Image (cartoon, rainbow, N blue to C red):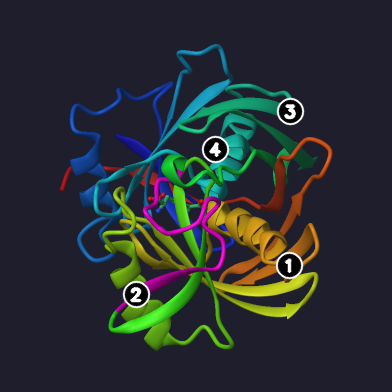
């Protein structure tokens, strides 16, 4: 099975072109094996680029490193768009891509025939507690108290198709990200587990984010997470609607548009190498 390794702001996945390859019988097991950084290709997970069954240009199916399937992946979607364009599956510079959060529109900036910067309409954030889903108090759950690891945190929860818990902190330390992140991921307040963002506010237009991802652990960037942070910053009165977010692997530009209530996310998408998987 041929694969391509791609990264968006350092959030790296193994991509399988299922227009050419057969979708595996056990996609979760393939994802677990390929994602392993010692015994596999190495990555934050595996993304299958499939023909759409809803009339879109392609369908992104995203599996975390632990084999769990997620509804959405913001950095992954930029890379899927680049792959679909650069490999000639569809050559338009605006693509409609099917995800677990619906069909999303992606605009590609192309240089010398290759997409290098990608803007995604991430759709409207979901802030209704039952739909996130979360059992946190408050609807929407903004500045809600959450107990984790014997400590109390003020958090805001948002779904971008997948669930997020945003924690504004003075400093996003290892102790918080690596120690508290997994505890929040598995908190009973989140029945489908949750992605956790620890965020420092640098100004009303600039933030620094570290993410503990559901099913993958700490990653260098999370696009749906950055979108959730953009929303949480506005809902808690900390930031403007248009922000730059610095992640460990690079920057993302976010805007929560007032007119259509959608989140627009712009960032890089890079193809790194390709190869052939001969089995685990
Ligand atoms: N890194 C991704 C999100 C990947 C899925 C996530 N771990 C989940 O389980 O929801 C992004 O860029 O959005």
Mark 2 → mark 1, Cα distance in angstroms? 23 Å
Apparent side of residue 277 relative to residue 211 in the rendered image (left or right): left
The response on whether ligand 1 sits within 8 Å of label 4 is no
Would you name the residue on which mark 3 appears?
A: 94
Would you name the residue on which mark 2 appears?
A: 147
Residue at image location 47% in from the left, 87% down from the top: 173
Mark 1 or mark 4: which comes first in sequence?
A: 4
Residue 278 in sight here: no
Q: Position of residue 114 (x, y in %)?
A: 71, 40
Q: Residue furthest front?
A: 138
Mark 3 → mark 2, Cα distance in angstroms? 43 Å
Mark 4 or mark 2: which comes first in sequence?
A: 4
Would you name the residue on which mark 4 appears?
A: 80
Mark 3 or mark 2: which comes first in sequence?
A: 3
Would you name the residue on which mark 1 appears?
A: 237
Apparent side of residue 82 relative to residue 277 in the rendered image (left or right): right
């Amino acid at each position: 099975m041929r694969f391509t390794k791609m990264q968006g702001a350092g959030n790296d996945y193994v991509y399988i072109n299922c227009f050419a390859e057969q979708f595996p019988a056990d996609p979760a097991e393939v994802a677990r094996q390929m994602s392993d950084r010692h015994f596999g290709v190495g990555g934050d997970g595996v993304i299958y680029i499939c023909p759409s069954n809803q009339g879109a240009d392609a369908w992104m199916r995203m599996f975390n490193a632990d084999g769990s399937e997620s509804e959405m992946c913001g950095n992954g979607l930029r890379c899927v768009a680049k792959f679909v364009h650069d490999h000639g599956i569809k050559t338009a510079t605006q693509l409609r891509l099917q995800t677990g959060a619906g069909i999303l529109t992606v605009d590609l900036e192309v240089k010398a025939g290759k997409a290098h910067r990608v803007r995604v309409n991430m759709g409207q954030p979901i802030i209704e507690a039952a739909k996130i889903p979360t059992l946190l108090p408050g609807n929407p759950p903004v500045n809600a108290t959450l107990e984790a690891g014997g400590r109390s945190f003020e958090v805001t929860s948002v779904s971008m198709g997948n669930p997020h818990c945003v924690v504004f902190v003075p400093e996003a330390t290892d102790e918080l990200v690596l120690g508290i992140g997994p505890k929040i991921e598995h908190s009973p307040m989140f029945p489908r587990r949750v992605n956790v963002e620890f965020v420092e506010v640098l100004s009303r237009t600039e933030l620094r984010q570290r993410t503990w991802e559901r099913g993958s652990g700490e990653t260098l960037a999370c696009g749906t997470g950055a979108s959730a942070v953009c929303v949480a910053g506005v809902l808690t009165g900390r930031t403007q609607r248009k922000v730059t977010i610095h992640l460990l692997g690079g920057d993302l530009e976010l805007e929560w548009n007032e007119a259509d209530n959608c989140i627009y996310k712009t960032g890089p998408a890079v193809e790194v190498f390709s190869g052939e998987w001969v089995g685990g």
